[in-house]
Image (cartoon, helix red, strand yellow):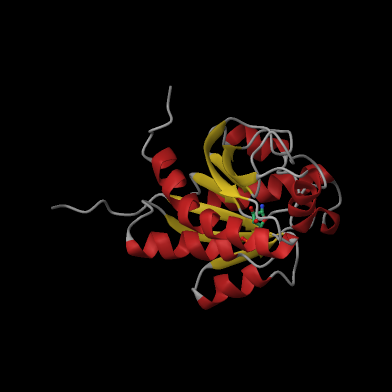
Amino acid sequence: MVEPLSKVHIAVFVSGGGSNLQALIDASKSGLLKGEVVLVISNMRKAYGLVRAEKEGIDSFVFKIKKYDTPEKANDDLLAKLKKYDIEYIATAGYLKLLPLNVVKTYKDKIVNIHPALLPKYGGKGMYGHHVHEAVINSGDEESGITIHLVDEIYDHGNILHQVKVPVKKDDTPDTLAARVLKQEHLWYARILDKLIKGEYRK
Ligand code: GRF
């Protein structure tokens, strides 16, 4: 069988630990994900996701709008970087900023995000990490879950591609619930990105 010359290039945006980034890298290596993470971008210089990238030999880039004269210059530079690496798909994985509009427009229907709850509940600005799990527990909901969705200009808003429910247990703390949810994130993110790349969500 003739193998294609190169895999689809993926950029992953992170702000923190990057365990979902790692899951994507691992899935790419095992062949579960028909694409390769070739660039990792973080707004946080100390994000452990950047260390993961380095360990894997993947190029990375710290993107801080304040380093530029104007936001426009920053956003142009970011897009130029994505082009330079021939990026075709973007996955945000614990990235705490909105992607700039020029990127969202250029990569329409080719950007995915993962959220640790069942959107549209518990989404939006400020709803990240333990804030999400605390809100779920305080609400008394009996189930939470994961949502993988396309990215548009609004936080946690684009078309939902996949959701998986996760039970909330009576004695859950934000940490125990987060751990149960994260397991599902690692299981599903690469699978759904793979389906997107293969065109399975095209209308
Ligand atoms: C995950 O729970 C993800 O759903 C959310 O932020 C967390 C990131 O975790 N957007 P990690 O950095 O991938 O470990």
Q: Nearer the viewer, residue 141 or 146?
A: 141
Q: Find residue 72 and report its horizontal and vertical position in percent.
A: 79, 42
Query: In this view, which residue lies farthest toward the top?
Result: 203
**Along the horizontal axis of the image, is 156 left or right of 148?**
right
Residue most extreme to the bottom: 55
Q: For the point 50% across and 51% down, which residue is it?
A: 189
Q: Is residue 86 above or below residue 196?
A: below
Q: Is residue 41 above or below residue 145?
A: below
Q: Is residue 85 visible?
A: no
Residue at 73% from the left image edge and 45% from the top image edge: 75
Residue at 79% over, 43% down = 139
Labels in figure, total: 0
Residue 79, visible in the rendered structure: yes
Q: Nearer the viewer, residue 118 or 106?
A: 118
The quadrant where residue 52 appears: bottom right
- Quarter of the rendered structure image containing ligand 1: bottom right
Q: In front here: 25 or 148? A: 148
Residue visible at 43% across and 21% down in the picture:
203
Residue 119 place in picture, x, y as percent: 66, 37
Left or right side of 96 for 6: left
- Where residue 69 appears, as percent x and y from the top left, is 86, 51
Image side of residue 77 versus residue 4, left or right: right
Of all residues, the one furthest to the left in this rendering is 1
Among the 4 quarters of the image, the one containing residue 159: top right
Q: Residue 130 sits in which quadrant?
A: bottom right
